[in-house]
Amino acid sequence: MDPIREAALVETRRHFFGRTATGIGAAALASLVNPQLFAAPAASQDATGGLPGLPHFAPRAKRVIYLFMSGAPSQLDMWDYKPKMEDWFDKDLPDSVRNGQRITTMTSGQQRFPIAPSIFKFSRHGEHGAWVSELLPHTAKMVDDIAVIKTVNTEAINHDPAITYIQTGSQLPGRPSTGAWLSYGLGSTNENLPAFVVLHSTVNGGFGGQALYSRLWGAGFLSTRHQGVSLRSTGDPVLYLSNPEGMSAELRRRMLDQLGDLNRLRFDEVGDPEIQSRIAQYEMAYRMQTSVPELTDISGESQRTLEMYGPDVTKPGTFAANCLLARRLAERGVRFTQVFIRQWDQHGNLPNDIRRQCGIIDQPCWALVQDLKQRGLLEDTLVIWGGEFGRTIYCQGGLTKTNYGRDHHPRCYTKWMAGGGIKPGIVYGETDDFSYNVTENPVHIHDLNATILHQLGIDHERLTYRHQGRDFRLTDVHGNVVSGLLA
């Protein structure tokens, strides 16, 4: 390929209109009649990468740690205590409760929808007596630090659209993720680390469960500089971060300087904003060569801290290790940390599987909140726990007194939030006796995302980006801040 010939073939805006003069009048007329059809000019960003004028008002939180339970944990076996269901064992779910609501193809062919009460014991905890399952003994100790939301709801009924929906505000792929929106709007407070970091947790040495695609932490139509950076648990935390053998730091610096000069020349020729993003990402990668190894080195943590997170904390890639890394990222000013753990999709053998999963996440979740609290970080760090939807009261497959499975249930499920100006020690919302429908204080996922943005000082209706002729936002076209959750 001849680079001189390639440069000569570049078609600038002036060249285009010079060769298509007959189209100028139509383009000019269209812009005068409806200028909103054209893309808005790219907003300038400040030194940290954020937008001028943000935050819109004084924030209560500076950063977010999102503990995402991919696969949908059963609210019925962990949080939403329904003692009346004991008398309904193996009886059919009343049609008046379901009321024709959509169900998945995995149970739509069943002849019956038998009620499966939880086999786990619940007890009251905290100052206000919140009900918590025996599966979560550590989390139960901190109910006075968290807000339990029992009425989160969504329209999506299958995993991929549901996770895409709660992460991006749309069931269809292609929109920016929550972390990307925050990176775009607020930028980072640490120039040596990305604003948005993603951690994937292993279960029994592997991942398993529903696949998680990189678009869930992608930037969509925003600049790629805002996408999440996924840290690996083996080898280099970030691929290609280390210098190749024989390349010194000085040589790397010279190479990047020369590459930057070439990229700037190319930008002057074609004006592609992604070239600027590429320059910024190269520079970030160079700075991360020092900052990431320091971040992942936990040798300086006290024995007391390590014991708080449990025995798995020293095993890279485990949920416990990732919770400790999330705290270290919060200390270093990372805006949004997403911790994924899979294998919550328990259509069968739920009692055994959920015991295992809760055994993995219970102590680290408690430790993270307490660790942040004792370091004075919880006050301005918003911690969120939960999945993409809930599980059904009726059994999927065979039902016995000791074993059952549960199908997907989007109508109501439980999440909890802590810190960052969220009111602690409350249980918000109520569901019916079957944990099937919301009876008080529904929280749609757009409401949840509006509340997250609000705590970071952002009016969710004003953080927008013009794309394909219209303004997009994380909460799409609706969503309300849940004032009952705010301290």
Image (cartoon, helix red, strand yellow):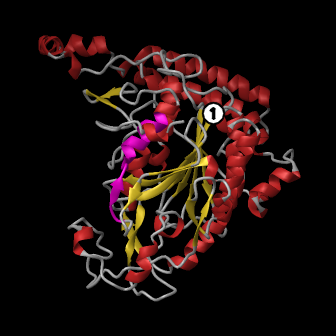
Residue drawn 50% across the image and 59% down it: 70
Q: Quadrant of the C terminus?
A: top right
| Image-quadrant location for residue 170 | top left
Asked if 171 appears above or below 125 in the picture, the reply is above
In the image, the segment drawn in magenta is 436-453
149 horizontally vs 144: left or right: left
Residue drawn 46% across the image and 82% down it: 404
Residue wearing tag 1: 380
Whole-percent x, y for residue 388 in the image = 43, 56
Is residue 347 magenta-colored? no
484 horizontally vs 336: left or right: left
312 horizontally vs 463: left or right: right
> Can residue 390 be seen by looking at this rendering?
yes
Whole-percent x, y for residue 407 in the image = 38, 72
- Front-most of 325 and 273? 325
Residue drawn 32% across the image and 48% down it: 172
